[in-house]
Amino acid sequence: MNKLMQEHRKRFGDFEVIEFVEPTEIERLRAQLDVDAPLTLHWTWEYGQEVEELRNLYEKGKVNQWNAERDLEWSIPVTNDDWVMNPEASMLAQICKMMGKDEATQKAAAFDELNHLLSQLLHGEQAALQICGQLTNACPTMDEKWYAASQVTDEARHIEALSKFLHRKMGTIYPIGPTLKILLDELLRAETARKKTLGMQTLFEGMAVGIFDLLRGESRNALLTEMIRRIEQDESRHAAFGVLTMRRAVREADASEKAEMEDWAFEILEALNANQQIDMLQILGPKYGIDPLNLTQATLVLPNWAELNSMPYMHTVIPNPPSRSTASSACSTASRGSRRRPHSRTAERARADGASADRRIVRYLALFSAQQSPTAREQRWPEDALAIDWAEPWERSSSLS
Ligand SMILES: [Fe+2]
Ligand SMILES: [Fe+2]
C-alpha cells in the first residue's frame, strides 16, 4: 500500500505520525485554490426511476429542508466564559487542568479547540459542496443526479450555518490544516464518480456524522446543539447515499477494481488518522504551553489509546446505530481524555475485541466487500473484520428521519 505524505512522517514507537513543520509549505498548500479535477460528464436519457432507494433518499431530503437563518435561534449567546461543551470533551482543557491552570484558562482552551474543529468541519463542507457538484455531472443515472443535486443545497446550507456560527459566535475561522487540505484535494481529483463517492460520500461523510454525533452529545449550548442536530440529520442522508451506492458498485466491480478501491480508501483513512491532531496542536498548543509532539507521544502510550482513538472511526464503521437512545457522550476527535461510551451494540462488541484503529478501518472497508465473493474476502481481511452485524440496513437507520 502506498502511504500518502511520506516526507512528513515521523515514527513514534509503532505509530507513524504526519507532521507539517515548514510554515511556508503550509501556506503554499493553502494558497493552492485551483485544483485540476478531471471529470467526465455523463448524459442520460432515462428519466424514469432506476434506483428506488436513491429516489427515497431524495424524497426524504425534500421533506427535511431547513433554513439556517430562520430555524436557528441566533440570539442564544456563545462565549468562552462558559463551558460550551462538557469539560471532559476538550483535550486541551483536560491538559490545562493537569498543568494546574485555572478554570478560566481551561474554558478558553476548550473554546479555542471547538473553534478549530468547527473551522475544519467548515472547510470539509466546502469540499463536500464541490464534490457533490461533480457527482451531479458524473453520475450515470438520473436518480443519482437528483440526489447529488439535492445534496449540493444541503452542503451550501451547512457552509452557511457553520460560517455564520463561527463569524457571529466564535470570532475566528481557523485556516485549513495541511493534512486535511491534501486529503480533500485527493478526493476532488479522483477520476471516477465511484471513487469520489467512496472518498467523500462514504469515508468523509461517515466520519462527519460520527464527529457531529459526538459533538452534539457533549454540547452544553442550545444553539450549537440544534445547529449540529440539523446538520447531522442531513449528513446521515449523505452517508447513506455513499453506502447504498458503494454496495452496488462493489457488486459490479471485479477483484482488481475492488482491491484498488480498498487500497485507496485505506490510504486516505490511514493518513487522516496519522495526523493525530498535530495540525491543531501546532496552532493552539503554544498558546497554552503545550508542546504538540510531546503531547502526541504521551497520548500514544496511554493504555486505552486504541479505544479512544478509534471512536470517530466507529461511527464510520457502524453507520446504523440501532437506537439513538443509547447514544452518548463521546466527543471530538480532539478529546482523547474524555469519557466515552460506544453507542451501539456492534460498537460495544468491536470495542470488546480490543481492535486498534487500523483494524477498525479494516472493518469499515469490509463493509464494501461483505456479502461479496467470500473467498476473496477471507484472503483479504482478517477474521474479525467479518464480524460486522449486517442485520440492520443503513436505510432503516433511526437517524434518517
Ligand atoms: Fe455537510
Ligand atoms: Fe454532507
Image: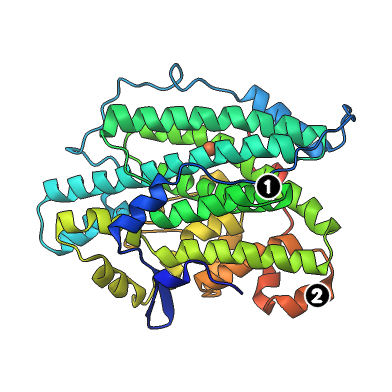
Nearest to the observer: residue 232 or residue 112: 112
Which labelled disc corresponds to residue 259?
none
The residue most toward the bottom is 13
Quadrant in the rendering for residue 83: top left
Task: Establish if 199 lies above or below 149.
Answer: below
Nearest to the observer: residue 389 or residue 59: 59
Q: Amino acid at mark 1?
A: Gly
For residue 272, side relative to residue 74 (left or right): right
Residue 69 visible in image? yes
For residue 14, side relative to residue 109 (left or right): right
Give the residue at x 18% y 45%. 108
Secondary element at tag 2: helix
x, y percentage for residue 298? 28, 74
Task: From the image, tell me which residue sits under label 2.
Answer: 376
Q: Amino acid at mark 2?
A: Ala
Task: From the image, tell me which residue sits under label 1.
Answer: 242
Earlier in the chain: of badge 1 and badge 2, it is 1
